[in-house]
């Protein structure tokens, strides 16, 4: 069932913002609990896993599994239990009144008693030539996920913060050489992470350098990278006729972007849902101090990378997806009891 958005005045039990692994896992649980969930697929149906070819660290697939295949299986599984999927991107939400109201980018509105936000966090891309074609084919944004495919390769890490150092240190276990490409002469990374990277013999630095283009194909993967440098840094901002701009194409077998992620939470701006300074959602602990997926607005839950700046793995996203569905189910049960009690009250 994959319909165009149906503008309806019916109030849904639960709507999921996002159809990545977190949204799908939540949909399986909610559908099996007869909550008739609606999944809004958003701008990237299936989420980030659709950008990758092989996943080797997701439990249950000893030979690995393709990203598309894993997502399609998850969608089939959720649909089997009655989850409904629709194209739709949330632009605005009104959470002050019950039921909640969602406004989609095509102008449709939806009402729901519970909301699960599973809208992910998008890795920032640098804008190099050919990156669209080669993402998932030697170009990656996740060393933990794809590092092991680069045994014996020369690889580049683009970035200068802690996450770039972390990615480089991880990749140094597999790759022949790791070169950190940074557009300035100073790192943004903490001293301790920078020292670890500097002390690792497999890691080199290219200062005042940026990635301009990637070479390769989906069949053979990445074969090379064109780097541009300038002694004053930020070379891509310099004009082409600046005599100090240097271009160089080098052989590499892999490139990793490590310039951060942006959580997809703009549509929650101005609401009482708490976010950290980067925009990641805060979740609350319960009265016993245990982790939940509840946000600071009752009835709104968060799952997957959108609330997790740290782990950002498919299996952790799926895990929190199931938690969010269970938390939403308990919330809806309590809401129903409250409504029944209110109806029984003498006027
Ligand atoms: C190239 C690559 C390779 C990876 N490889 C691995 C791997 O091998 N193993 C591993 O464990 N992890 C891997 N990861 C990480 C993994 O993909 C993520 O941790 C996981 O996809 C997070 O799932 P999610 O559901 O939280 O978010 P996402 O997968 O990011 O999904 C977010 C969903 O929200 C939707 N959305 C966003 N905004 C809106 C909106 N306003 N309205 C409606 N919908 C919206 C999007 O359309 C999308 O469907 C990889 C990531 C990348 C990029």
Image (spheres, rainbow, N blue to C red):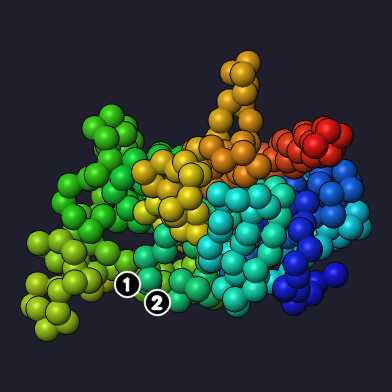
Q: Secondary structure at mark 2?
A: loop
Q: Is residue 121 visible?
A: yes
Which residue carries the number 1 mark?
212
Q: Nearer the viewer, residue 190 or 253?
A: 190
Q: Nearer the viewer, residue 161 or 342?
A: 342
Question: Where residue 203 appears, x then y in whole percent?
Answer: 33, 44
Q: What residue lies at 62% left-to-right and 39% top-to-bottom? A: 298
Q: What residue lies at 56% left-to-right and 30% top-to-bottom? A: 284
- Asked if the residue at tag 1 contacts the one at tag 2, i.e. Cβ–Cβ closer than 8 Å, the answer is yes
Q: Nearer the viewer, residue 303 or 148?
A: 303
Question: Where residue 282 appears, x then y in whole percent?
Answer: 50, 38
From what the image shows, is residue 127 above or below residue 183?
A: below
Q: Would residue 166 be found to the left or right of residue 185 on screen? A: right
Question: Where residue 211 appears, x then y in whole percent?
Answer: 32, 66
Distance from the alpha carbon under mark 2 to that under mark 1: 6 Å
**Residue 129's mark?**
2
């Amino acid at each position: 069932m994959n319909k165009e958005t149906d503008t309806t005045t019916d109030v849904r039990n639960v709507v999921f913002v996002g159809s990545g692994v977190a949204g799908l896992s939540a949909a399986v649980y909610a559908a099996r609990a007869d909550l008739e969930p609606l999944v809004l697929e958003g701008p990237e149906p299936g989420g980030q896993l659709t950008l990758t070819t092989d996943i080797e660290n997701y439990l249950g697939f000893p030979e690995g599994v393709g990203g598309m295949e894993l997502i399609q299986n998850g969608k089939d599984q959720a649909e089997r239990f009655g989850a409904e999927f629709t194209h739709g991107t949330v632009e605005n939400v009104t959470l002050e009144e019950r039921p909640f109201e969602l406004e989609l980018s095509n102008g449709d509105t939806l009402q729901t008693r519970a909301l699960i936000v599973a809208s992910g966090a998008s890795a920032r891309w640098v804008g190099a030539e050919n990156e669209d074609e080669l993402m998932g084919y030697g170009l990656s944004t996740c060393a933990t996920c794809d590092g092991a495919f680069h045994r014996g390769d020369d690889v580049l890490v683009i970035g200068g913060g802690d996450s770039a150092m972390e990615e480089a240190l991880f990749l140094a276990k597999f790759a022949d050489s790791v070169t950190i490409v940074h557009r300035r002469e100073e790192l943004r990374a903490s001293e301790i992470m920078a020292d670890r990277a500097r002390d690792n013999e497999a890691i080199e630095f290219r200062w005042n350098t940026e990635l301009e283009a990637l070479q390769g194909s989906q069949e053979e993967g990445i074969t090379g990278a064109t780097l541009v440098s300038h002694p004053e840094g930020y070379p891509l901002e310099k004009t082409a006729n600046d005599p100090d701009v240097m271009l160089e194409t080098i052989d590499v077998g892999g490139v990793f972007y490590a310039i951060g992620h942006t959580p997809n939470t703009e549509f929650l701006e101005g609401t009482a849902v708490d976010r950290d300074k980067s925009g990641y959602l805060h979740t609350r602990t319960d009265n016993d101090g245990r982790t939940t997926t509840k946000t600071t607005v009752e009835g709104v839950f968060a799952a997957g990378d959108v609330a997790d700046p740290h782990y950002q793995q498919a299996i952790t996203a799926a895990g929190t997806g199931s938690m969010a569905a269970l938390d939403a189910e308990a919330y809806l049960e309590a809401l129903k009891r409250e409504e029944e009690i209110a109806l029984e009250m003498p006027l």
